[in-house]
Image (cartoon, helix red, strand yellow):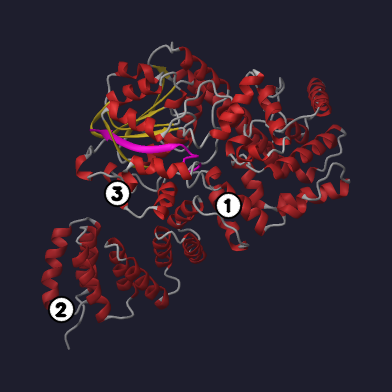
Amino acid sequence: MNPIEPSENKIKELISLFDKKKFDQLLKLSNELIDEFPNSILIQNIQGVVHTELKNYKLAKNLFIKVVNLSPNYTDGHYNLANVYNKLDKKEKAIESYNKVIELDINYFKAHNNLGNIYRKKGLNKRAIECYLSTLEINSNYKVAYYNLAGVLQFYILDEENKNINKYLLHLLKEKIIVRPNSIAPNILNGLFLNTDLKNNLSLIKDKITNEDFNYVLENLQKNSLLMQFMKVCPIPDYYIEKKFVKIRKEILNQTYKLNIDKNHINFLISLSMQCFLNEYIYDQSKDEIEKIKKIDERIKNNLKENKKISDLEILCLSCYEPLNNFSWSNKIEFSDKLKEIFELQIKNKKIEIQISKSIKSISKVEDQVSIKVKKQYEENPYPRWENLGLSIEPRKIKDVINDSNLNLNLKNITNSENPEILIAGCGTGQHVLTTASKYKNSKVLALDLSFKSLSYAKRKANELNINNIDFIQGDILDLESIGRKFDVIESVGVLHHMDNPFKGWKILTSCLNDDSLMLIGLYSEKARQHITQIKNKINKLKLQSNYKNIIKFRKDLIENNKDQWNLIKRSPDFYTVSGVRDLLFHAQEHQFTISKIKKHLDKLGLIFLGFEDQLVKENFKDNDTNKDDLFDLDEWEEYEKFNPRIFAGMYQFWCKKN
C-alpha cells in the first residue's frame, strides 16, 4: 500500500523553504511530490498557504477546498480556507468555515479572534467583543486579541453587566503600548459601575462621614484593582467620581493633619496621588485645605531639621495637592520603595525632561506674535500629560497602512519609498508622533513643535518605549522651509487652526510634500464646537486670563451651573485636566472651519481630498448614505453635517495629496 503523505524529511524540507520565503523552490518541489502523492493533505495545505502569501487567493481557495474534502476533520484546512474566504471578501463563507473550526476544536483561539474581526467589519461590535473574550479565555497571552479588543472598545460602549471583561480591561491599562486609556475610558467607567461595587462604596462618601465608614470605603476602593490602575494611567473623565474623590482627599488631609490616618490605605493614596498629578490638580481646594497643606509642609521641614523620619503618608497627602517638586524639601529626602512610582512620576521625570530639553535643536527663533503666545501656553501647560498609548503591533509599508484607511486613491499612484520620510508638524507631548513612528516600516520621522517642554516630554516617552526613529526639533511651521527637506507623509492634526493664518501654514506644509505623497490634516469644525464658542465668548466677556486660578474657578462655576447648555462640555475628556481645559476653552488662538472653507483651501493649494480618517465617522455616514462614491464627495459630507452637527466633534481629520 502506497503512503498518502511524503516522508517526514520531505515535509520538513518544504516547511524550511516556507520559513525562508523561498516560495518558487517550495512550489517546484511540492509539485514534484504531488505527482507521487496526489491525495497528500499536507502538501496541498502548504501550497495553499504559499498561494495565500503570494495573494493568489482563488488558487489557494481551491487547494484548501480540496484539503477539507480529503479530510473533513482537518481543523487547519478549515481555518486556512476561512482566511482565504475573508481575503476574497466572502464574509459569510468565512464565518461558516471559522465556525466549523470551532466546532471541531473549541480551543482553536485564532478562529475565535478572526471571527471577531469579521463581525467588527460588519459593524456587529457586541459579537466581536464576545469573540475576542472567548479568544482570551482560551489564550490570555494572545497579544493580537488584546489589540483587537481595545480597537472595538473605542467604538462601542458596554451597557450590560459582564464581570468577565474587567480582568482584560485591567490588562489593557497595565500594558504601555496597546491603547490610549482615554480612548477606552467610557468603557472602563462602565466596567467599574456595572461590574464592581464602586457606586455603592462611593455613595457612602458624604459631607460628614464617620471614621469607620471612611476606612471601610478606602479599604474597598483599594481592593478594586481596575479602579486603582485606572487612576494611575488616565485622568478619570467622570464628575461623580471627581466629587467623591475631592471629599476623600479632604478627609485624608484632615486625618494626616491630625496624624491619625490608617497606614493600610497607602496603596489607595498612591493611586490618588498619581490621579491628581495626571489631572494637574484640577480638583478645587478650600481655604481650610490650603492652610492645612501649609502646616503639614512646615511640619516636614521641621522634622527634616531635627533628623526625624518623614512619613510616607504625609508625603503622599501633599502630593495629592501639588507636585512634589513644588516643595523645597523634595530633593532632600530619601524616598521609600513604597513611593517609587510617585518619585519617578513627580520628580525624576521632570529632571530627565530638563536634561533632554538642553539637547533639542531649534530651526529658528519664533517671531510670529501668535506663535509666541501659543508657545508660551504649551511651555506652561504641555498638553496632554499621558502614560500609555496604542502603538502598532508591527510597522508596515506606506501602502499597507494607507490601504486600511479606505481612501479614494489608487495605491499605485503613491510613494513606494522603502525608507519613508515622515513629518509630524505640531507633535505636542508625543502621542501622535510615537504612534506614527511605530506604524511606518523603516521610517525616519521629524517631530516639530513650538514648545520645548512638550518636545522633552515626547522624547522622554520615546526613550522609555525604545522608539528611536524620531528626530525632535523645536520651531515654527512658518520656518519649516528653511530646513530644505521634502517628506513622503506629512501629518498635522489639531495644529493649523492655532496659527495666525492657517492657510499660510498649510501652504508651507504643502511645499514640503514630495510628489505622489500624502498629507493628513486635522481641523476644528465650526458646527461641532458651537457650545465651545459660547463658553469662549463668556470667558472673553469676563476678560479672564488663562492662569491656573482662573481655570479652576471658571470650571467650578460651569460645573455648579446646572444649565443643560453646558452638559456637552462636561462630557469632554479635556474637561478633566488643567491643560485640557486651557486647550479647550482658554486657548491663545483658535480658528474654526467649515467643509466649504476646507474645499476652497484644497483648491487653492492644488490638493485632492482623498477621504476622512475616522472610521466611526465613516461608518455613521454609510448608515445614512450607501453610495460608496459619496464617501469622497465633500458636498455630500457638508449636507450630512447639517443634520449631524456633532459628527466632527473630534475634528475634521482627512487625507489629501497634490493634484
* Crowd rating for badge 2 (residues with CA inside 10 Å; few <14, some 14–19, many 20+): few
- Identify the image quadrant of the C terminus: top left
> Is residue 16 among the parts visible in the rendering?
no
Residue for badge 2 = 38
Q: From mark 2 to mark 1, how far is it between C-alphas?
A: 53 Å
Residue type beneath disc 3: Asp
Q: Residue at point 69% right, 24% down?
A: 330
Report the side of 251 relative to 446 (left or right).
Answer: right
Residue type beneath disc 2: Pro
SS at badge 3: helix
Cβ atoms at labels 2 and 1 below 8 Å apart: no
Q: Residue furthest bottom?
A: 1
> Is residue 288 among the parts visible in the rendering?
yes
Q: Residue at point 32% right, 53% down?
A: 627
* Crowd rating for badge 1 (residues with CA inside 10 Å; few <14, some 14–19, many 20+): many
Residue type beneath disc 1: Asn
Residue 187 is tagged as 1
Q: Which residues are magenta?
A: 646-659
Of the numbered discs 2 and 3, the one sitting upstream in the chain is 2
Eye-nearest disc, 1 or 3: 3
Eye-nearest disc, 2 or 3: 3
- Residue 503 percent coordinates (x, y): 37, 23
Q: Quadrant of residue 166?
A: bottom right
- Residue 323 percent coordinates (x, y): 67, 28
Q: Quadrant of residue 231?
A: top right
Residue 629 is tagged as 3
